[in-house]
Image: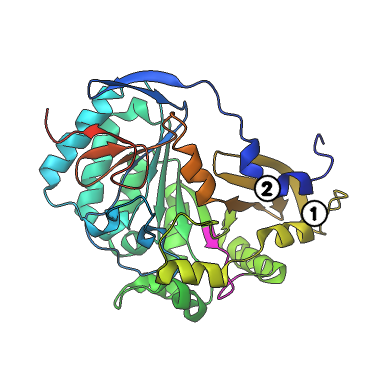
Amino acid sequence: SAIPEPGELRDGRWRTFEPVAPVERALRGKRFLLRPGLTFTPYANPTPCNAHCSFCSEELMRLDADRLSAKTVIGDFDRYFEGLARAWSELAGFPMGLSLSGLEATAHPEWLLRLLTLVQTHGALFPERVLYTNGSGLRTDPRLVPALATAAFTRVELSRCHFDEVINHRVMRFDNGQPIRHRAAFEETVHRILKSGLGLKLVCILNTEAVSTLAQVEAYLDDAEALGVTQVVFRSLSELGEVYRDNRETRWITRHRVNTRALLDEVMTDQLVTRAGWTFVGMTAGYYYSNEVYQRGTIEVVIESASYVAHHEGVQRGVLQKLVFHSTGNLCGDWVPNAQVVGNYFSP
């Protein structure tokens, strides 16, 4: 009700984000400023990914990067988890969100199960725990969904670009032999997660190869509602600006990005007239993303825009906006493994 014209906020809305005062912490013998409520990501690359999504952000090389985290898989699991435990012990008393992403965490079930055990040991650190996944391991290993529930995960964010398996595979491109590439296996996985009591949010990356129009968005929501899903997020392909090196993924993203602003203008006009069947709930903004939230039928719908340019600017302002634990043992305030380095935790 306090928003006179949504269009004023739809252009670069993450820039309206007003951060709370940072907290100072000593990490590896140095002082750092941390944003309260930041997320911690143990970068999930125990093995190469089992899908090769056309839009994969882990294949994007920033100009200031000298390597990709995705190319350095975790070698020594004992050393890795000992280092991660050191980092979490040093951060004790600073509650964060646990954001489990990177490559595909479920592709190596033993690694994931060991991580979940460690999460429970440091439970007070993580009031919110989220797994971002393509669902592959959840379909093939029956231990994983119950283990996530036991580890008190808040929700699973399950990626699917389209309910038609042929269209979806054009974009997500699973390895041969992955059952989740088929619609029946995907739907069975959705039901398994819902039955466990875990929260579930379907994630659809908007792109012109799969879902790009409002009619296609609504068809996706109809399928999701029939499955019993109550939360769906439609994410834009992030704005890349001039901070990434040209490669196959940057070209694909540029070619297939959907104009999220135009989509939002169809859902709700500047006169606050909402499309039939949609109810406006609110707007939220982070340091590099922005959301509009609606209710359509039984589903909470989030339409999200993001800018990696704003992300890059945000992490260079002297306050750590997020923490990423890389396979090298480095804890960084950035996805780039040689940027915003806090320190290495492989040694005591």
Residue at x 71%, y 41% (from the top left corner): 282
Position of residue 106 relative to residue 22, above or below, is below
Circle number at residue 292? 2
Q: Which residue is mark 1?
A: 268
Q: Quadrant of residue 123?
A: top left
Q: Viewed as shown, does residue 267 lie left or right of 322?
A: right
Position of residue 25 relative to residue 334, above or below, is above
Circle number at residue 76? none
Q: Is residue 12 visible?
A: yes
Q: CA distance from mark 2 to mark 1?
A: 10 Å
**Residue 262 shown in magenta:** no
Instruction: Give the image location of residue 343, x and y in percent.
Output: 23, 32
**Residue 205 shown in magenta:** yes
**Circle 2 residues within 10 Å: few <14, some 14–19, many ≥20:** some
**Tag 1's secondary structure?**
loop
**Tag 2's secondary structure?**
strand
Check whether the beta carbons of the residues at disc 2 and disc 1 lie within 8 A of each other. Answer: yes
Q: Quadrant of the N terminus?
A: top right
Instruction: Give the image location of residue 224, x and y in percent.
Output: 59, 63
Callout 1 amino acid: Met
Q: Quadrant of residue 219?
A: bottom right
Q: Which residues are magenta?
A: 203-211
Residue at x 71%, y 67% (from the top left corner): 214
Q: Is residue 185 visible?
A: no
Q: Quadrant of residue 117?
A: top left
Residue at x 68%, y 48% (from the top left corner): 292
